[in-house]
Image: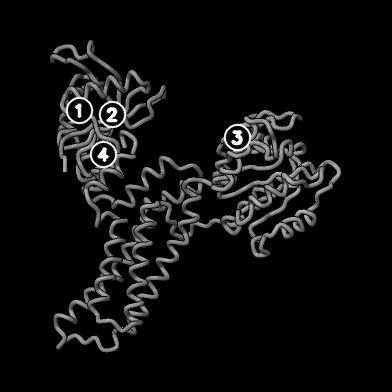
């Protein structure tokens, strides 16, 4: 592991009130001490206690005479001595005036006096390598930075506090106990008996399988929490799709006219509904057309809808259904869908009953109707949008999303590791039921133990660690 001293800008590269340059490593305090002076011109940092904040100046090219002519900026310098720091190394943070030029000037000065530029995520990587946090907590740091909703943020904070780590560590304890017992019994059969052990191991195996299954079930919601609900708005031309997008976004993002086919390309926006993030795509109106450009837009709409988590199908309830609607109804089969009977302020031609009958006639299974919500709306009068928000919450989170003691798996790497561990535990169960020798159990138990270990970083190689931290921003 590298132990040299690293430095980076820890705040956004933009004009701001304060900028922070973070320095970490065995020479961090000594390096900053060379360029920091109190108002009286003293070098004091080497003699100060940990966790102190000190007022003074950053100076450059100071020759020991008049430091005031070499002042770069007026600063506050925080000192955190090892191991009581984020990296568990000596760490110094220089709080200066914000602005790209200023923070870059001070960073360059720090580099000239002995530090090097930190790699992306290197501060958090050092925290992991020095044992302050495990790998799942380290990954939670970047998830916090990239959170797209309040729920995603809270889930990431819970992971940083150890929600995932604690669940995985407990499962590994359960597994390693059984491995140790089997190995001990095989090594010393005179003193440790395996009589009746299959029954107790089967009970423990089924318990672990159920715990792993629950974690896997949480990953669907976890993905949505982290990335948002991939939502596509579809409908015939002039049904009110673009008006709906503008209403949800809160500004005129899409052009709205009475001319059918106005939207020909894809419009993408992210919005938040009660803390849930929706990544919305407004598509071209779906209809048969000879217009080459519009036809491309229709094909794109169908492609995006096929990959969506949620489809919002906007129906003009003031005109009868036609072949274009039937095409869309076929397209939403098997998809979570909210159908908006729009233009409810006009005379209603398409009712919920008419629409449901048509959906059934076109071959939708009865149980698939559970994934379809039908709501009357008017984008002109701004009615029904509150019901749309409630329907989405019911559809994806059964109406409520609680963070009391629930663990959400939001990381695909974690999910894959849990799937592998789950399969190994199923193999243990099959081996028990087939009355296989005990050493067969140990092989698959150890495989599950190792797979879970990759989540917290106990069974990972250097290449994977480097790949994970390369996705971090500079200065974190």
Q: Badge 3 local density, few (<14 within 10 Å), some, or many (20+)? A: few
Is disc 1 in contact with disc 2, using a CB cutoff of under 8 Å? Answer: yes
Residue tagged 1: 32
Cα separation between marks 1 and 3? 60 Å
Identify which residue, 31 or 171, lies in the foreground.
171
Asked which secondary structure carries label 3, the reply is helix
Quarter where residue 10 is shown:
top left
Q: Badge 1 local density, few (<14 within 10 Å), some, or many (20+)? A: many
Is disc 4 in contact with disc 2, using a CB cutoff of under 8 Å? Answer: no
Which tag, 1 or 3, sits closer to the chain's start? 1
Q: Quadrant of the N terminus?
A: top left
Q: Residue at x 70, y 49 (%)?
A: 339
| Residue 263 drawn at (x, y percent) | 66, 32
Which tag, 3 or 4, sits closer to the chain's start? 4
Q: Which mark is residue 296?
A: 3
Which tag, 3 or 2, sits closer to the chain's start? 2
Nearer the observer, disc 4 or disc 2?
4
Cα separation between marks 4 and 1? 19 Å
Left or right: 430 with respect to 28?
A: right
Q: Quadrant of the C terminus?
A: top left
Nearer the observer, disc 4 or disc 1?
4
- Compared to residue 47, the image places residue 168 above or below, namely below
Quarter where residue 468 is shown:
top left
Which tag, 4 or 1, sits closer to the chain's start? 1
Residue tagged 2: 94
| Residue 131 drawn at (x, y percent) | 23, 51
| Residue 401 drawn at (x, y percent) | 54, 56
Left or right: 409 with respect to 343?
A: left
Q: Residue furthest right?
A: 347
Nearer the observer, disc 3 or disc 2?
3
Q: Residue at x 68, y 46 (%)?
A: 313
Q: Badge 4 local density, few (<14 within 10 Å), some, or many (20+)? A: many
């Amino acid at each position: 592991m590298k132990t040299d001293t690293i430095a980076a800008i820890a705040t956004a590269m933009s004009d701001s009130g304060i900028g922070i340059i973070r320095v970490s490593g065995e020479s961090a305090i000594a390096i900053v001490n060379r360029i920091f002076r109190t108002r009286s011109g003293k070098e004091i940092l080497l003699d100060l206690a940990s966790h102190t904040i000190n007022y003074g100046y950053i100076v450059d090219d100071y020759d020991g005479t008049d430091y005031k002519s070499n002042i770069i900026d007026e600063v506050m310098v925080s000192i955190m001595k090892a191991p009581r720091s984020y990296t568990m190394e000596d760490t110094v943070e220089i709080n200066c005036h914000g602005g790209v030029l200023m923070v870059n000037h001070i960073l360059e000065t720090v580099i000239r006096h002995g530090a090097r530029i930190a790699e992306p995520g290197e501060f958090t990587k050092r925290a992991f390598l020095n044992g302050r946090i495990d790998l799942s907590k380290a990954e939670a740091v970047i998830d916090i930075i990239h959170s797209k909703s309040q729920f995603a943020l809270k889930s990431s904070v819970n992971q940083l506090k150890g929600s995932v780590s604690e669940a995985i560590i407990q499962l590994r304890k359960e597994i390693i106990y059984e491995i140790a017992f089997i190995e001990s019994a095989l090594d010393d059969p005179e003193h440790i008996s395996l009589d009746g052990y299959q029954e107790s191991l089967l009970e423990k195996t089924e318990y672990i399988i159920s715990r792993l299954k629950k974690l896997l079930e949480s990953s669907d919601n976890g993905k949505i929490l982290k990335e948002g609900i991939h939502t596509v708005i579809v409908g015939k031309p002039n049904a009110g799709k673009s008006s709906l997008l503008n209403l949800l976004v809160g500004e005129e993002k899409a052009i709205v006219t009475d001319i059918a086919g106005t939207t020909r390309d894809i419009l993408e926006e992210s919005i938040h509904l009660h803390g849930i993030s929706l990544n919305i795509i407004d598509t071209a109106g779906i209809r048969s057309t000879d217009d080459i450009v519009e036809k491309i837009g229709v094909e794109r709409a169908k492609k995006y809808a096929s990959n969506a988590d949620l489809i919002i199908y906007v129906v003009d309830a003031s005109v009868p259904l036609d072949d274009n609607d039937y095409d869309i109804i076929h397209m939403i089969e098997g998809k979570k869908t909210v159908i908006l009977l729009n233009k409810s302020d006009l005379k209603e031609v398409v009712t919920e009953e008419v629409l449901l009958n048509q959906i059934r006639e076109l071959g939708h299974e009865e149980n698939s109707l559970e994934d379809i919500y039908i709501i009357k709306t008017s984008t002109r009068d701004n009615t029904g949008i509150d019901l749309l928000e409630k329907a989405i919450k019911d559809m994806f989170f059964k109406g409520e999303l609680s963070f009391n003691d629930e663990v959400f798996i939001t990381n695909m790497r974690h999910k894959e590791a849990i799937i592998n561990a789950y399969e190994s535990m199923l193999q243990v169960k099959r081996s028990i039921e087939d009355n296989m020798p005990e050493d067969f159990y140990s092989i698959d138990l150890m495989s599950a133990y190792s797979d879970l270990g990759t989540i917290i970083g106990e069974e990972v190689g250097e290449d994977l660690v480097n790949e994970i931290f390369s996705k971090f921003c500079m200065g974190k």
